[in-house]
Image (tube, rainbow, N blue to C red):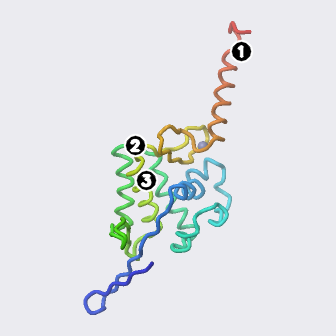
């Protein structure tokens, strides 16, 4: 939704864009599919970026913002450090710097709910993604965001319950198998009494 505001006789024109709500699942998908850190760790750096339509992102905000693949990648790179830095002051500082860069402004929607607008000059994609993380952190705790604890994975996750350490069940079982193998190898090394 585009709102046009004329300033002083119409010489200056401000275009304010109402930011779409991006679900947290889509924030995770954008960062995991497009950030340099996650692509490199997954060995996908040389592969082309996946088209948004192929990775189940919500059509509503994509239609409104129409980000290019390069814009998605730039926003993903900007967001990954929120999840990778230690929770607390550092993490808040990273998120706050992204909010300062995109400068979303809080607005009361007609139904009284909190909405956000952005000056068309600013990066609407980065603004919408930053607001999504801000809202999620406010509701569920920003310390419940993280980077997968599995070896060779830097995918991110958000877990409202705060119990999760892995991006997926695949990484969880991969780690369990690795730990099991390591213990077994240790138990069967020469000098061990378990044989
Ligand atoms: Zn993982």
Say if residue 103 shows up in the picture.
no
Viewed as shown, does residue 73 lie left or right of 100?
right
1 or 3: tag closer to the N-terminus: 3
The nearer-to-camera label among 3 and 2 is 3
Rounded to the nearest angstrom, the CA distance separating label 2 from label 1 is 40 Å
The nearer-to-camera label among 1 and 3 is 3
Q: Residue furthest front?
A: 111
Viewed as shown, does residue 186 lie left or right of 113?
right
3 or 2: tag closer to the N-terminus: 2
- Residue 50 in the image, given as x and y percentages of width and height: 65, 62
Identify the residue under disc 1.
188
The quarter of the picture where the N terminus appears is: bottom left
- Crowd class of label 3 (few under 14; some 14 to 19; many from 20; radius 10 Å): some
Identify the residue under disc 3.
136
Can you tell which quarter of the image residue 102 is in? bottom left
- Residue 104 in the image, given as x and y percentages of width and height: 36, 67
């Amino acid at each position: 939704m585009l709102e046009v505001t004329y300033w002083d006789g119409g010489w200056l024109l401000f275009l304010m864009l109402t930011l779409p709500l991006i679900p947290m699942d889509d924030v995770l998908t954008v960062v995991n599919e497009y950030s340099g850190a996650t692509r490199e760790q997954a060995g996908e750096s040389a592969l082309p970026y996946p088209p948004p339509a192929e990775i189940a992102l919500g059509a509503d905000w994509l239609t409104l913002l129409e980000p290019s693949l390069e814009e998605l990648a730039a926003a993903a790179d900007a967001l990954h450090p929120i999840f990778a830095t230690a929770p607390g002051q550092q993490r808040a500082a990273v998120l706050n710097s992204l909010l300062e860069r995109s400068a979303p402004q809080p607005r009361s929607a007609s139904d009284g709910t909190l909405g956000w607008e952005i000056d068309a000059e600013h990066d609407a994609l980065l603004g919408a993604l930053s607001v999504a993380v801000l809202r999620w952190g406010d509701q569920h705790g920003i310390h419940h965001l993280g980077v997968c604890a599995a070896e060779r994975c830097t995918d991110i996750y958000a877990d409202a319950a705060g119990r999760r350490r892995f991006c997926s069940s695949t990484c969880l079982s991969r780690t369990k198998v690795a730990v099991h193998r390591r213990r077994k190898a240790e138990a069967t090394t020469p000098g061990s009494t378990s044989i």
